[in-house]
Image: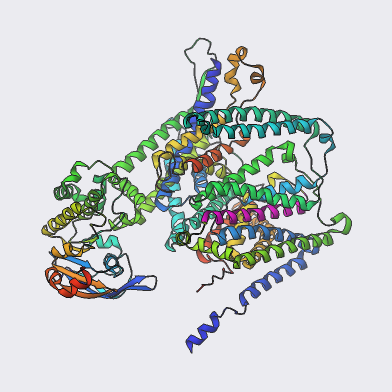
């Protein structure tokens, strides 16, 4: 009797009770938010949550499918956001009407030439130059040419900033920026992945953390390209904006766009997951040595999955920036754009796409709702403190409430790792054979 | 009372049983040798005795005291030493530091034991300030045995001490095992070179498929035609 | 000649200061890496925590330094080191030890340490705010001006009081660590465990003790590094991610698991940073007449602007990972 019951429980076509319950809970929460905060606010929340779901899907395939940990989601999100801005906003006549584009083009040409010259220098050994000498020549050339190019670039960008503000956009359809954002993020991911391939996974985490801060520093300080801290807005939408059809409808239309994107990504990912490619990826994650022994090209597969994840992050970041209708490089924070996504993935279930989407929506609702809640709790504590001990309330309550959220996110990460390492909807690992 | 008495030991890794009831007993001044085909559970048995593997059934007694499933550092305190087959030295530590680590739990008698170990293995004295990673295979094996001896064990477990050594070194190691034993240390070792090992063994245990096949004195096993036919290659 | 003085002030001294701080931080990271085999991402915030403890103690006992004639912050540093060491051991017990007990992969510990870093960040900033604060509450930073005995050297070499203390403390810390690792029983056991953890256990070394000792040392060193950094400039609670990258780069350059390598790596990264942001056109000025015009006209010959300083450790990291992932001294853990 007992064995029979165990069989029915383990049957592959079990009723997805857990999934249904969790998604029902999310639905109830969403309806609750609609009832309390009104449709315009709530739809905005849902659009943002759906953008985060795309980011989370990117991270879940890197971490859940392949066991690669990306600690710099923020950088790829920012790249996507930059492309969404650059390709979609109107053309800046003050820039294009002057001789500055030619100047910038000349510097870019210098840059390409310099790269080619240095590359050629690294090949000098084929002409019979001793290897040591070749290395010295290549390094010296690289240093000198770098200084020349960077000086020329500084000159042009200063001109652009003083005469035209910034170079403006290209005025292309929004979708172009999203696609190129994904491609650019994938390209940077390819570079990082190549460097860290075959090394300990810790190194990938360190490198991604670094590249994210560099991308942010670049976008923040390149005023000629992004207006830096002055921010760029408004960014056009792929659907009619609030001024044409009203907030709720416009946001609902935007939501339908992101929902279709998620559905498409979800469908393609599950196809890939169950295809031989996905099986191979998981075999590599679960047992690298035996996978290598079976003659699988581990590093190539790993690179593919890492780049794919970065592409999704770029696209999600682009959708997020377009929706906010503003590009603010300083607004990219590790907390909001790396760790929040991480919590979504590990709480929802790394490697389980459905779990990841659940995690994204659920965590985002909690995140958004925790802001007023944290402020309220802080005020309560202050009132209590003043009453009981005559404590001086700090003036910057808002920023301190933000720090309380930093703490809570950190605590959540450690707790989930310890008590629910597979998330609320664990990846269903099927044993073949 | 035997020094080591293992009765009906079962155990393995992650649900897979490798040992299916092994019995093994040696007296205080004896050399015990475990031989058998690949996958018979020889090294696994040694690891089970040294607490590196969970014993799921049966018992292991050291001088009548149950010791199965105690952690290794407790067993070192109780007078057991273990020399693994591979990675048995600290490569970046000097020879002397390697030996000192063996006496980690008994820092009081480092000086006395160092002298004794250098007496057992004279080459180590000359190389005492050299990192162990730079030594030859045979010398490393000496460092490994010396390290285990530093804690003054009453029972020394050796996992294939001659693996990968040239025949010249192999004989040297067997000689040194006999020397250590004559100083009053009980030895239990796993060996691939069954004939040579059984020749110096007081007790021999032939394992197959995680069970005892033959248990007798070393000389008797060498003389047994059945053992010779199936396990000693004719 | 003044250009040379400028170079000494801006590169030699500044580089040694940054290098010392990175070196002490990297030693902690590399020790944790060699014993527990994971990259400890909470190290930057552990440094901040140490400096924050000094700040709290200095605020509580502002007069402690005047009695001996040393800055108050330094008198109270040992206490802050003890508190930070305690915090490090506590964090290990509460967060890392249970994960290790489950036998998770090292990368899960990395994620756990990111969780810990957020918790520390949140707590420190909750109490300290996000602005900068000086650790010199009642003391004045003394500045030493050493005139160079050369003809025409009008500008003096400038060293501040905290910088002098920094060099002394770094030296003491490195020598002390060296003696601990090479002479003491626990130090040797630490190196043994870093070499071969299984054999260390089989030798009767209590690995839990070694882990705790590692955290005590790493925490104390983190407190030193954080305090020295805050003394040199100001206490800034939001530095952690900008400290992590150079420190990891230093540890990897030196060969992970190699404490002396980490010290060397710290100075490599520190000097690389200052050299990269140094404006080389200053050194060309004396040769103005004999150089081509296009070279002297460039006003700024720095490799990167100070706002891009973080690119330097990243560049070093990429170069070392591509060229020699084991580091210049061949680390044990790759």
Determine the residue positioned at 52% across, 34% down: A126
Classify residue C333 as left or right of residue A187.
left
Q: Position of residue A105 (x, y in %)?
A: 74, 33
Determine the residue positioned at 64% across, 60% down: A57
Q: Position of residue A218 (x, y in %)?
A: 66, 40
Instruction: Using the rendered image of the protein, determine whether residue A261 is visible from the camera's viewpoint.
Output: yes
**Residue in front for this viewpoint, A287 or B25:** A287
Determine the residue positioned at 31% across, 57% down: C201
**Residue in front for this viewpoint, C285 or C16:** C285
Q: Quadrant of residue A249?
A: bottom right
Q: Main secondary structure of the magenta part?
A: helix
Q: Which residues are magenta?
A: A298-325
Q: Quadrant of residue A224?
A: top right
Query: Is residue B179 a member of the stretch shown in magenta?
Result: no
Up the image or down, B142 lies above or below C250; here it is: below
Query: Is residue A312 a member of the stretch shown in magenta?
Result: yes
Residue farthest toward the front in the current orientation of the protein = A127
Up the image or down, A1 lies above or below C224; here it is: below
Q: Position of residue C93 (x, y in %)?
A: 43, 57
**Residue in front for this viewpoint, A129 or A287:** A129
Instruction: Using the rendered image of the protein, determine whether residue C60 is visible from the camera's viewpoint.
Output: no
Residue farthest toward the bottom in the current orientation of the protein = A1
Determine the residue positioned at 64% across, 43% down: A215
């Amino acid at each position: 009797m007992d064995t029979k019951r165990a069989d029915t429980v383990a049957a592959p076509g079990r009723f997805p009770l857990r999934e249904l319950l969790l998604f029902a809970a999310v639905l109830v929460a969403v309806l609750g938010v609609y009832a309390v905060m009104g449709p315009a606010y709530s739809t905005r929340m849902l659009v943002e949550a759906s953008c985060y779901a795309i980011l989370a899907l990117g991270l879940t395939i890197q971490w859940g499918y392949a066991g690669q940990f990306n600690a710099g989601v923020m950088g790829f999100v920012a790249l996507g956001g930059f492309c969404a801005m650059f390709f979609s906003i109107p053309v800046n006549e003050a820039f294009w009407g002057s001789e500055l584009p030619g100047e910038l083009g000349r510097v870019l040409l210098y840059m390409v030439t310099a790269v080619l010259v240095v590359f050629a220098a690294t090949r000098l050994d084929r002409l019979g130059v001793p290897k040591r000498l070749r290395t010295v020549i290549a390094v010296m050339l690289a240093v000198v040419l770098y200084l020349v190019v960077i000086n020329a670039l500084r000159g042009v960008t200063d001109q652009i900033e003083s005469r035209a503000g910034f170079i403006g956009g290209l005025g292309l359809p929004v979708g172009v920026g999203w696609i190129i954002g994904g491609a650019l993020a994938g390209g940077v991911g390819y570079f990082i992945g190549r460097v860290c391939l075959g090394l300990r996974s810790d190194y990938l985490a360190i490198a991604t953390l670094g590249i994210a801060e560099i991308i942010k520093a670049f976008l923040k300080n390149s005023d000629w390209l992004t207006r830096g801290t002055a921010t760029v807005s408004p960014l056009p939408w792929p659907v009619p904006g609030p001024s044409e059809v009203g907030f709720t409808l416009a946001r609902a239309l935007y939501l339908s766009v992101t929902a279709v994107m998620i559905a498409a990504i979800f469908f393609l990912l599950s196809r890939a997951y169950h295809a031989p490619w996905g099986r191979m990826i998981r075999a590599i994650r679960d047992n690298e040595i035996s996978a290598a022994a079976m003659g699988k090209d581990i590093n190539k597969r790993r690179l593919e999955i890492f780049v794919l994840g970065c592409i999704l992050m770029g696209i999600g970041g682009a959708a997020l920036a377009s929706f906010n209708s503003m590009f603010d490089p300083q607004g990219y924070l590790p907390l909001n754009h790396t760790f929040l996504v991480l919590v979504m993935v590990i709480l929802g279930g790394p490697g389980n796409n459905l779990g990841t989407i659940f995690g994204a929506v659920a965590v985002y609702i909690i995140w958004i709702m925790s802001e007023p809640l944290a402020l309220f709790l802080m005020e309560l504590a202050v009132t209590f403190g003043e009453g009981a001990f005559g404590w001086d309330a700090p003036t910057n309550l808002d920023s301190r409430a933000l720090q309380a959220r930093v703490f809570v996110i950190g605590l959540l990460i450690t707790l989930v790792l310890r008590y629910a390492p597979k998330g609320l909807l664990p990846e269903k690992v099927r044993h073949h054979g | 009372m035997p020094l080591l008495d293992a009765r009906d030991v079962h155990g393995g890794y992650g649900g897979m049983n490798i040992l299916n009831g092994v019995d093994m007993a040696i007296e205080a001044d004896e050399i015990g040798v475990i031989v058998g085909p690949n996958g018979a559970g020889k090294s696994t048995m040694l690891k089970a005795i040294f607490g590196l593997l969970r014993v799921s059934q049966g018992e292991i007694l050291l001088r009548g005291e149950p010791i199965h499933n105690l952690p290794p550092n407790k067993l070192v305190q109780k007078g057991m030493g273990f020399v693994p087959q591979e990675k048995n030295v600290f490569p970046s530590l000097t020879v002397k530091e390697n030996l000192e680590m063996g006496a980690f739990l008994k820092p009081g008698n480092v000086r006395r034991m160092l002298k004794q170990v250098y007496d057992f293995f004279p080459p180590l004295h000359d190389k005492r300030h050299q990192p162990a990673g730079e030594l030859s295979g045979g010398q490393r094996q000496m460092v490994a045995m010396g390290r285990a001896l530093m804690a003054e064990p009453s029972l020394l477990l050796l996992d294939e001490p001659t693996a990968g050594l040239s025949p010249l070194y192999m004989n040297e190691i067997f000689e040194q095992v006999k020397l250590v034993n004559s100083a009053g240390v009980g030895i239990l070792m796993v060996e691939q070179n069954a004939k040579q090992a059984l020749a110096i063994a007081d007790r021999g245990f032939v394992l197959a498929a995680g069970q005892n096949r033959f248990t007798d004195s070393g000389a008797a096993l060498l003389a047994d035609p059945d053992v010779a036919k199936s396990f000693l290659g004719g | 000649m003044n250009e040379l003085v400028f170079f000494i002030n801006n590169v030699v001294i500044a580089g040694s200061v940054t290098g010392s701080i990175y070196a002490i931080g990297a030693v902690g990271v590399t020790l944790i890496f060699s014993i527990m085999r994971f990259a400890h991402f909470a190290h930057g915030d552990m440094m901040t925590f140490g400096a924050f403890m000094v700040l709290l103690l200095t605020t509580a006992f502002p007069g402690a330094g005047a009695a001996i004639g040393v800055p108050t912050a330094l008198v109270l540093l040992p206490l802050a080191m003890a508190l930070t060491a305690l915090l490090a051991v506590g964090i290990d017990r509460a967060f890392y030890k249970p994960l290790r007990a489950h036998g998770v992969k090292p990368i899960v510990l990395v994620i756990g340490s990111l969780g810990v870093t957020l918790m520390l960040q949140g707590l420190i900033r909750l109490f300290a705010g996000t602005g900068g604060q000086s650790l010199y509450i009642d003391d004045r930073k003394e500045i030493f001006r050493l005139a160079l005995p050369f003809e025409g050297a009008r500008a003096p070499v400038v060293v501040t009081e905290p910088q002098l203390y920094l060099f002394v403390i770094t030296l003491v810390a490195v020598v002390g660590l060296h003696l601990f690792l090479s002479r003491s029983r626990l130090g040797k056991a630490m190196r043994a465990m870093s070499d071969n953890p299984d054999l260390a256990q089989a030798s009767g070394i209590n690995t839990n003790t070694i882990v705790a000792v590692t955290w005590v040392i790493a925490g104390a060193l983190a407190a030193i590094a954080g305090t020295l950094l805050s003394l040199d400039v100001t206490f800034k609670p939001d530095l952690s991610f900008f400290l992590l990258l150079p420190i990891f780069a230093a540890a990897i350059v030196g060969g992970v698991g190699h404490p002396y390598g980490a010290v060397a790596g710290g100075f490599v990264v520190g000097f690389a940073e200052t050299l990269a942001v140094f404006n080389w056109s200053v050194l060309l000025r004396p040769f103005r007449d004999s150089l081509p015009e296009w070279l002297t006209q460039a006003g700024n010959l720095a490799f990167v602007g100070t706002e891009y300083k973080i690119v330097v450790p990243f560049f070093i990291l990429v170069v070392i990972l591509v060229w020699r992932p084991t580091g210049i001294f061949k680390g044990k853990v790759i």
